[in-house]
């Protein structure tokens, strides 16, 4: 946020007499939130991979434990299904991150 507040367009807005509240909420927060959204998307995907370990260690029933059990039993269709499910979740998370970029910064265009 401090990096965005030190940019030239913020200085221009201050020179025009725009209130600091308007500058922070309408301009600076939108530009500063893009890296935060990126990190949150990566953390979501990282947490998804951590569920496999957590479910196995704490014996919580779920897809992570199912994947470990299926790999121990050499059950290939179940492993493929769990991998497909996790892949779909990763794709949806990336889609949500990219869509939020579009909402936060209209200059980001779909190609």
Image: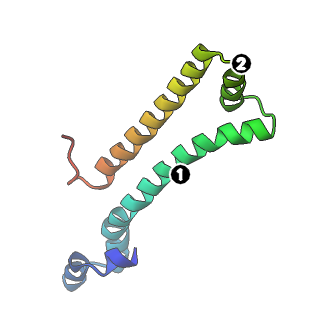
Furthest-bottom residue in this view: 15
Image position of 9 (left or right of 45)? left
Q: Quadrant of the C terminus?
A: top left
Q: Rounded to the nearest whole Å, what is the CA distance between mark 2 and mark 1?
A: 30 Å
Work out whether 92 lies above or below 37.
Answer: above
Q: Which mark is residue 77?
A: none
Image position of 66 (left or right of 7)? right
Q: Residues within 10 Å of mark 2 (few under 14, many from 20)?
A: few
Give the residue displayed 72% in from the left and 30% down from the top.
65
Work out whether 5 lies above or below 60.
Answer: below
Query: x, y percentage for residue 77?
Result: 58, 14
- Please state which of residues 67 and 40 is positioned toward the viewer in this rendering: 67
Query: x, y percentage for residue 2?
Result: 39, 78
Query: x, y percentage for residue 9?
Result: 21, 76
Residue corresponding to mark 1: 43
Residue corresponding to mark 2: 73
Furthest-right residue in this view: 59
- Please state which of residues 25 and 100 is positioned toward the viewer in this rendering: 100
**Residue 24 falls in which quadrant of the image?**
bottom left
Give the residue displayed 38% in from the left and 75% down from the top.
21
Work out whether 30 lies above or below 24.
Answer: above
- Going from N to C along the chain, the mark reached first, 2 or 1, is 1
Work out whether 28 lies above or below 91.
Answer: below
């Amino acid at each position: 946020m401090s990096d965005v507040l030190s940019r030239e367009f913020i200085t221009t807005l201050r020179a025009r007499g725009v209130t600091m509240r308007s500058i922070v909420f309408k301009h600076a927060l939108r530009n500063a939130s893009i890296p935060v959204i990126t990190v949150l998307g990566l953390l979501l995907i990282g947490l998804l991979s951590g569920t496999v370990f957590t479910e196995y260690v704490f014996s919580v029933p779920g897809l992570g434990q199912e994947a470990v059990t299926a790999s121990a039993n050499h059950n290939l269709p179940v492993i493929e299904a769990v991998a497909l499910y996790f892949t779909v979740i990763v794709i949806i998370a990336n889609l949500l991150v990219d869509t939020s970029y579009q909402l936060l910064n209209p200059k980001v265009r779909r190609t």
